[in-house]
Structure formats: C-alpha cells, structure tokens
Image (tube, grey):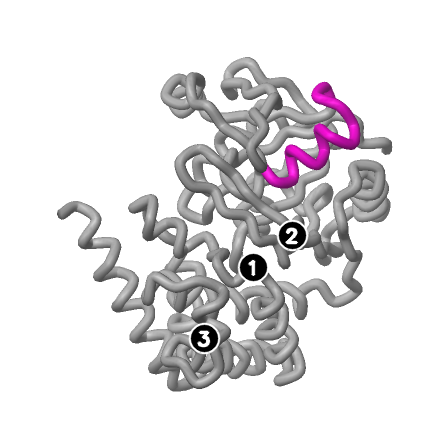
Amino acid sequence: MSIKKVAIIGKGAVGLLYGSIIERSMGPDAVEFVMDDARYERRKGDAVTVNGSPCGIATLPASKAEPVDLVILAVKATGLDGAIATMERLAGPKTRIISLLNGVTSEERIAARFGWENTVLSVAQGMDAVFIGGALTFTHAGEIRFGAAQGTTPGVVEDIEAFLSRAGIAHTVEQDIRHRMWTKLMLNVGINQTCMAYGGTYGTASEQGSEQNRCFVAAMREALAVAHAEGVNVTEADLAQMAALIASLDPQGMPSMAQDRINRKPTEVEEFSGTIIRLADAHGILVPQNRWLYKRIREIEAGYAG
C-alpha cells in the first residue's frame, strides 16, 4: 500500500517539525493537522511559524475529517485520550498508525481501540525543536525509529518506511524496537525531568560536575535498572550514547518539559518518573532520584495557579 495522505494529531513541536518536512518534500496536499472541534475553534486563528516562515499546512476539525493512509500522533501523553477520540473519523481499515508520544505505553492504549494490525511501535529522538509563543525553531530534525509489534500485520512497517523515505524524514527500522523505546524512556526520564525541575537547558544538564548533570545521569541510571527488571537489556553504553546525544545539541535548546514550565502547561511526568516509580515498586528497586523529580515537578505544576 502506498501512503499518499497523512493526518497529524498534535500541532506542537514534534507535529509541526515533521509536518513541515512532509509538506516541503511532498506538497501541501499530502499532509493535514486534525483537531477535535472545540480545540479547532479555539486555535483556528492562531498564527504559527516554522523557523520563521508561516506554517501553510491545512488544519481541519475532526467532524470534517476523512480516512487517511497514515495517522501520526504527536500529542503529549496528557492528550492521548482526546487524540484517540479524534482519530475515529481518520482511521479506516487500512490506515497505518504511528505514535511519536514519549513513554512506552501509548501504543497499547491506541491498539486497544484500533487494533495492532496497522499499529507500529516507535520513538522520535534527536530533534532540538523548541515551540514557544506560536513559533517553532529547530536545527536538528532528529529521526524516527520504529518496528513491528507482535500483532502488526506484515507489510505495514514497509509501507511506513517507504513513505518516510519519500518524505525525507530520517528513520531507522528497529529489529528490537522495545529496546529502543526503553532507551528513549531512559533519556527522557533524565533530560526532560532535569531540565523541567531546574529550569535548565541541554547545555546546563550536560555540564560535567554540575548538580544538573548528576541529576540527569542518576535518573537515567535508575531507569536502566528498571528496564533490566522488565527484561529489556538497556546498557551503560546506551546511557553514555544518550548523554553524548544531548551534549551534541544546541546548548541553549531545551526538551519539551522545560518548555512546559515556560508555557505553564501540564507535563508528562506520569509517563516518566511516574512509570519508573510504579515499576520500581513492583520489582523492589530503589529510585530516589526519580521520586525527588516527581515531587519537585508536581510542586512546580501546582505553582502555575499562583
């Protein structure tokens, strides 16, 4: 099956980044954003730019959407239930589904409604996108890594790979995608939460010997221990690779949770330290750094009202 029409749910940093690449490579008719009707009414007049240029991708309310060849979910974990409802009119019997949400649980929730047949497991990593005040900026587009779940129909991965190649989106098909997802979770547990808790950047979290760097590495190492208990062989080499990846990014850049702090938005802390704490409790593993991060982030979120 050749993928020609794509709908993206989530008009934030990740959705705008990949939507703009698809539009540039395949034209404006190949991609659209779809929102629930209430959000569409609130946002339809918003001006959005990508690296200084107006975003020309069409945005539709869910009530006017029709089935597409591929749905890309690029919302925050806090918006997944709404995104699944928005997908109802987009998902036909052959619609492929790829979720770029953080964490390791979104695909299970998506497949519970739409089935595993057309759903793949995936992560997006390596981008330095910052979306504040309606302006997206990025220099590194990162890449999508994905692979078949146990129930994915043969050919679905190949269809998505062919589309990403035509669209000019960097990607890798993983034979052990669960390992990659846990490696990305380990990274997010460290970098996203550290930068949110401290108001930091990629540069401050990578500064050797700093308090932020110690927090970053300690939180990742706790996630690594939990991954092992879950039967996933994430290694110290994976940890070092992720730390080097962050050190290679724009030192003034920041991950999504640090942007949430600036924008005063709810974070994905439940997907990160919330997941690590829950699984650590089940396995009898001590995770003090993640417990501190969870508490600190919740305190910051509670302060938004003031």
Residue placed under numbered mark 3 in the picture:
216
Which quadrant of the view contains residue 165?
top right
Q: CA distance from mark 1 to mark 3?
A: 17 Å
The residue under label 2 is which amino acid type?
His
User: What element does badge 2 sit on?
Assistant: loop
The disc at residue 140 is 2
Please tell me whether residue 119 is drawn above or below residue 246 in the rendered image. above
Within 10 angstroms of label 2, few (less than 14), some, or many (20 or more) residues?
some
Near mark 3 (Cα within 10 A), the count class, few <14, some 14-19 or many ≥20, is many
Location of residue 210 by image quarter: bottom left
**Left or right: where does residue 18 sit relative to residue 112?**
right
Tell me the residue at 82%/46% (across/down): 161
Residue 31 belongs to magenta span: no
Comparing 251 with 17, the one in front is 251
- Residue 91 location, x and y as percent? 64, 29
Relative to 147, residue 92 above or below? above
Q: Are marks 2 and 3 in contact (CB under 8 Å)?
A: no
Q: Main secondary structure of the magenta part?
A: helix
- Look at mark 1 in the image and give the residue it sits on: 250
Task: Please tell me which residue is depicted at 37% across the width and 49% down the height of the picture.
Answer: 260
Sequence-earlier tag: 2 or 1 = 2
Amino acid, disc 3: Phe
Mark 3 falls on what kind of element? helix
Q: Amino acid at mark 1?
A: Asp
- Identified at 24% across, 58% down, the residue is 300
Question: In this view of the protein, can residue 282 be seen by the observer?
Answer: no
Which label lies toward us, 2 or 1?
A: 1
In the displayed structure, 275 sits above or below 15; it is below
